[in-house]
Amino acid sequence: MSAPHRPVDPQQSFPALEEQVLARWKQEKIFERTVENRQGARRWVFYEGPPTANGRPGVHHVLARVFKDIFPRYRTMTGHLVERKGGWDTHGLPVELAVEAELGFDKKEDIEEYGIARFNAMCRDSVFRYLEDWSRLTERIGYWVDLDDAYRTLDNSYIESVWWALKTIWDKGLLFESYKVVPHCPRDQVTLSSHELGQPGAYRDVIDPSVYVRFPVLEAQGPLAAGDELLAWTTTPWTLPSNAAAAVDPELPYVRARGGEKTAEAGAGETVFVLAQALVERVLGEGAEILATFPGRELEGVRYEPPFPFIAGDAYGERGHTILLGDFVTADDGTGIVHTAIAFGEDDFRLGEQYGFTVVNPVKPNGSYDERMGPWAGRRVKEVDRDLVADLRERGRLLRSEEYEHSYPHCWRCGTPLIYYAKPSWYIRTSEIRDRLLASNETVNWHPPHVKHGRFGNWLEGNVDWALSRERYWGTPLPIWRCAEGHVHAIGSFDELEQLSGTRLDDAHRPFVDEVEFPCGDCGEPMRRVPEVIDVWFDSGAMPFAQWHAPHEHEERFRELFPADYVCEALDQTRGWFYSLLAVSTLLFDQSSYKNVVCLGLILDGEGQKMSKSRGNVVVPDEVLDRFGADALRWYFFTSKQPWDGYRFSHETIGEMVRQFLLQLWNTYGFYVLYANANGITPPAGAPDPATLSNELDRWVLSRLSATVEVVRDRMDDYDATTAGRAIQAFVDDLSNWYVRRNRRRFWDGDADAFATLHHALVSVVQLLAPFTPFLVDEIYRNLVPEGAASVHLTDFPVAAPRDEELEFAMGVAREAVTLGLAARGQAKVKLRQPLHAAVIVATGRERAALERLADVVRDELNVKQLRFAAAADELGRVEVKPNYRSLGPRFGKSMPLVAAAVAGLDPAGVTAALREGRTVGISIAGRDHQLEAEDLITAMQPLEGYQLEREGSHAVALELTLDEALLREGTAREIVHAIQAARKAGGLDISDRVELRLTGPEPLEQAVREHGDYISRETLAVAVDFTVDGDVNGDVNGDGTVSIDGQPLRIAVSRVAG
RNA sequence: GGGCGAUUAGCUCAGUCGGUUAGAGCGCUUCUCUGAUAAGGAAGAGGUCCCUGGUUCGAAUCCAGGAUCGCCCA
């Protein structure tokens, strides 16, 4: 007879097993079949946030990818059609920087010299450099996604869809070009968008000079005299040569002041300074003399001498180098007088616009001064800070200079400090649709929920226009053409461009697209494309339609797959993809493109430190996968904590997860297979009907299973894999450490109900686990159900059967009683092998009924001959009556201390008697009588001296410890069985081998053997038991040795019987 | 400087509606069991529930302020 199941290797290497499963999935196209299987079913839509494959994937990518995997798997099993199109983000500055580094470039001009066509060709090659690594890892961790048909943002079709989107936005009047002060990277010569400033590492603490600069007043005006000096404060000395004006708050009080400790140090003790009143002491030091006080508005128009002479005041217009009034000025720091450089600050720029200033910008895009700046021309602005300060000091224009530590934005890729810089850029007027963005966000179900109105909602509230354009090379070209007259045309498709220009694009990238010209429809002048490409975040935000080339193609496909039910990325994408997806779809379709989103936290190392190459604590996914396997890593990510809380990653924790859970499941499965094979049990079909099961444990475990299915479905429906996974783990623990342990005997005996029950429980568990740990459970499923589906992933997710909650409660009570009884044994130091006469259990009502129902279980587990119930609890101990605060608190409020005192004064015996008979108990509080019911009082046991008793709340179990000869002999017999089993094992016998036993020992042991011979034979599969008192053992034996039983020597010889 | 989150045993984490003895796993110590055996069971040690104040009969839980850590923004 061939065994129903392949034998299970208890030493199975999980990583090796996973490789086998992977090979089978591939060969049998299991993933494809899970999708085909649901053709015609209701869709559940997942969008893949595209990664860039120009670097090796790290462990945080594994985190994201397994969370992207689990819910689609779950929804597929619950009957949905879930297609999973992969995607790759391919454009952008990171790609360009990698290529630049490879070519040894360090400035933008190098690219132009090298040639944009060659440069972009290299970018195109480099973006898939690690595609192999990504594909291999994706497959290895069991992330089911269609990478063969993945969308790629560099494809012409993708770009054409993005063009359509931009033209649509243009037609709505929401795309425009404007001068703005923007964060500018002088190294990459590129504007950074606000979400790029949100990239990790953008803000860094730096020390800059903080300078108090003196602006001499040229002529007396208002409250000021000629020769008074305005004090201005700045942390960017390099902007001082571009000083255009000084700003004060109109309402704030300002002063003329002289003296003070700090001016003395600077050798300016006699000078009259002008500054905000509130800052006099901080800036001038103690002892300054205030000469006059006046509101800032009186200072408007005062002319002063700028700190550097390179740009004349009238270059800015007639208000150049005068005092202006600004609403952004505060007396929080500095001097209350703000040095204003129109081109280098957002507030400055706005103020300049307001006063009609001309923008004069003496800084070139590469961050160096132009020829207007005399001796400083050609020098990099950030490098010249300290020299400028020295120059000011020499010329007596500096009050003092300090070090100032603050956090300052840097380019997130190249690390260069950014400068704020006025330049023309293209924007999407997202601020105009802010309310629509907020409305879209309202429809999104965020996990964790606080992101919705917290981090993300706040960000939307403060929405600023999307800085869309980038003066770079490798990206989606901005489809805007313009003529010399300034007429503008936005192109929405390649057909449109061809009709206008006669040129069909083979490659929509630069430089080819730059060469396409056509005559202006308004004036006939040639139109040329503006030079910019667009922010890559717009690319990825356009994926809902661009992945299908909609609307140019597959419009209906896009419509049926929009919006997504589910997206998932790391928390840092709130300003990244989560925003661009929401913004693009709100701009175009006035709705969110996703309904549910899971945000993932950061992965730190075991010490809570950020992973970084310099610390050498970066976890390489392959190491973890080779050592523990993908299921172990997945299980860790899913269940160790809520994913948005972040992880402290350690190999030890994953090892523990394997032992605690995967190994426990594997052992339980192995146990089933071992005994099913031994008994020739063929796999039962379907679930056993609880009504036909006579064993309470069978019905109990099925009810527990149903309870687990309910929780798992409920939690998974709410994107809570953590609670769902933990519920499965708790069930597997119950299954292994209670159901199987309690029923071992029945499995040895081939009990059909037990096998059917365990089989169903195991099959259900592996189905529940299929989205979590897809490898291991598929192996288990296939072996448990050899005639079933080709894979557990092709089956339907378990549906909860009716539960028997009374039985679940009863088992809880029984297990509690067992725990108490085992504890009592431990206290009394009586071995479990020694049978005892009785356990006496205190329990009433529902709990007593529960224990009577499950008496067999409790008796067997505690190894006692009978269970007795204490008629009244005081047989075993003193009863204590306590108030139930939960029910009495709301009723009595402030009087609770009086109630507690009154309850303490009650007679416990009387109370328990009354409650048992269903009567109420009366107490008197402040002269008024109140009736207390059973639920208002808690009875607890206090142990009496001299009893071996364990108690927990209202429960107690006592053991009767007196032993007689019969019990002792039975205990001895169990010791002997234990010794024989050890000998069998030592002799290398299989668990089903029949044996002959020859025992030699003193007379008391013989008695035990004679009296319990049947028991010993049954337990040890002995066909013959021969006992010789103090004799010798001869003949061929498989195991032979002497052990000590209760201090007496027993020689055991075991020999296998053929057949 | 502002927003969001976190802080519970040596470690990793639960803790429902505020309810009077705050739990689990791991680790440690001591037992125990063994036909799942690198597993299982019991006991023990281990807690300022970050701090301070408030609300309440009652606070790990609610409120305010503060500390520390993380993320985000400026």
Image: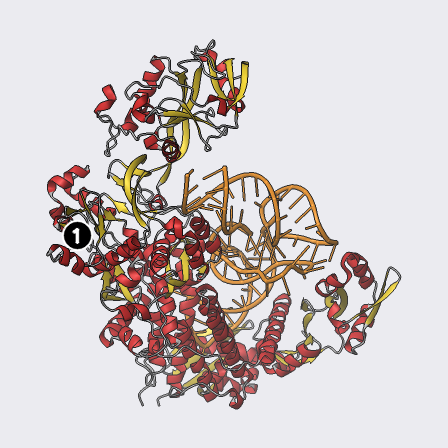
Q: Quadrant of residue A872?
A: bottom right
- Residue B56: x %, y % from top left: 73, 53
Q: Is residue A386 left or right of residue A280?
A: left
Q: Quadrant of residue A685?
A: bottom left
Is A882 drawn above or below residue A235 in the view shown? below
Quarter of the image with the N terminus of chain A in it: bottom left
Q: Residue at x 28, y 63 (%)?
A: A545
Between A119 and A888, the one lying in front of the other is: A119
Quarter of the image with the C terminus of chain A in it: bottom left
Q: Residue at x 77, y 58 (%)?
A: A896
Between A466 and A141, the one lying in front of the other is: A466
Question: Which chain is home to disc 1?
Answer: A
Q: Residue furthest top?
A: A270
Q: Is residue A159 left or right of residue A897?
A: left
Q: Secondary structure at mark 1?
A: loop
- Residue A946: x %, y % from top left: 73, 67
Crowd class of label 1 (few under 14; some 14 to 19; many from 20; radius 10 Å): many
Residue A773 in sight in this render: no
- The residue at which mark 1 appears reads as A509
Is A594 drawn above or below residue A191 in the view shown? below
Is A636 drawn above or below residue A805 in the view shown? above
- Residue A799: x %, y % from top left: 45, 79
Q: Residue at x 26, y 63 (%)?
A: A547
- Residue A1017: x %, y % from top left: 48, 86
Give the amino acid at mark 1: His
